[in-house]
Image (cartoon, rainbow, N blue to C red):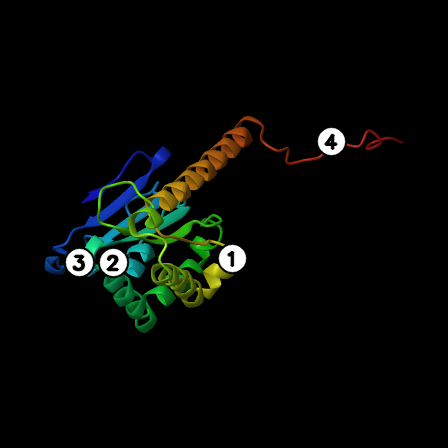
């Protein structure tokens, strides 16, 4: 499912279900170059995360000058969360998806658009209930250790983006919602500043010196 909203709150969501392995991704499906006012991109992937390798390509086709943020959420199966997360962490260590994302985000077109913490990579469960990871799975040391490893892998494999302060990681729906609220506030502040500049444009020239022209 691909959905686009008006530019003032532009959000493109890509949601791939459990039959993702049956999908045949093509460049036509993931070409976002015609979304001129896209400012936030959200990608939701279900296990087995077949579209994961396509994420750098999807981002590479974003050309909107309004682009500020992107969130990639991996939805783990409730009854196989540890196995799914272990498998994904191993995959992230072995493939080059995060490195390609990091490289693309350093391109000139993204150098001044991605806001602080604007690139979010997160994990969640495929249960529709609104619960934090701690509430759903308990505060087990094993799970917590995997969350820490998720954060470490993302930051280590994306060193340039991490150094710029544009990376963020989340571990459940609540943390993702907080990230979304932060991005909304950032966008609203940017729109307000732009509106104020339109109303009160900065003078291009200084006032003339009254002594100019004097004998």
Q: Of 180 and 42, which appears nearest the observer?
A: 180
Mark 1 or 2 closer to N-term?
2
Q: What element carries label 4?
A: loop
Which disc is residue 26 wearing? 3
Are the two marked residues, 1 and 4, in contact with CB atoms closer than 8 angstroms?
no
Camera-nearest label, 1 or 3: 1
Q: Name the residue under label 2.
A: 81
Residue appearing at x 30%, y 70% in the figure:
90
Residue appearing at x 25%, y 58% in the figure:
81
Visible in this render: residue 67?
A: yes
Q: How far apart are marks 4 and 2 (CA)?
A: 66 Å
Camera-nearest label, 1 or 2: 2
Mark 4 or 2 closer to N-term?
2
* Count of numbered circles on the image: 4
- Residue 45, x across and y down, in percent: 23, 54
Mark 1 or 3 closer to N-term?
3
Q: Mark 1 points at which residue?
A: 164
Q: Is residue 99 above or below residue 22?
A: below
């Amino acid at each position: 499912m691909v959905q686009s909203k008006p530019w003032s709150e532009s959000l493109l969501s890509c949601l791939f279900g459990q039959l993702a392995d049956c999908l045949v991704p093509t460049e036509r499906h993931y070409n976002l170059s015609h979304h001129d006012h896209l400012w936030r991109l959200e990608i939701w992937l279900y296990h087995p995360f077949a579209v994961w390798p396509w994420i750098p390509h999807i981002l590479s086709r974003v050309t909107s000058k309004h682009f500020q943020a992107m969130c990639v959420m991996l939805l783990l199966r409730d009854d196989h969360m540890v196995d799914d997360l272990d498998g994904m962490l191993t995959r992230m260590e072995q493939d080059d998806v995060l490195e390609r994302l990091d490289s693309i985000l350093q391109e000139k077109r993204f150098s001044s658009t991605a806001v602080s913490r604007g690139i979010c990579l997160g994990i969640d469960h495929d249960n529709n209930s609104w619960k934090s990871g701690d509430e759903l799975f308990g505060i087990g040391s094993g799970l917590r250790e995997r969350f820490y490893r998720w954060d470490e892998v993302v930051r280590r494999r994306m060193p340039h983006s991490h150094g710029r302060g544009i990376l963020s990681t989340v571990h459940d729906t609540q943390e993702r919602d907080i990230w979304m609220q932060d991005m909304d506030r950032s966008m609203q502040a940017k729109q307000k500043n732009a509106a104020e500049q339109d109303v009160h444009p900065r003078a291009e020239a200084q006032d003339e010196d009254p002594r100019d022209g004097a004998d």
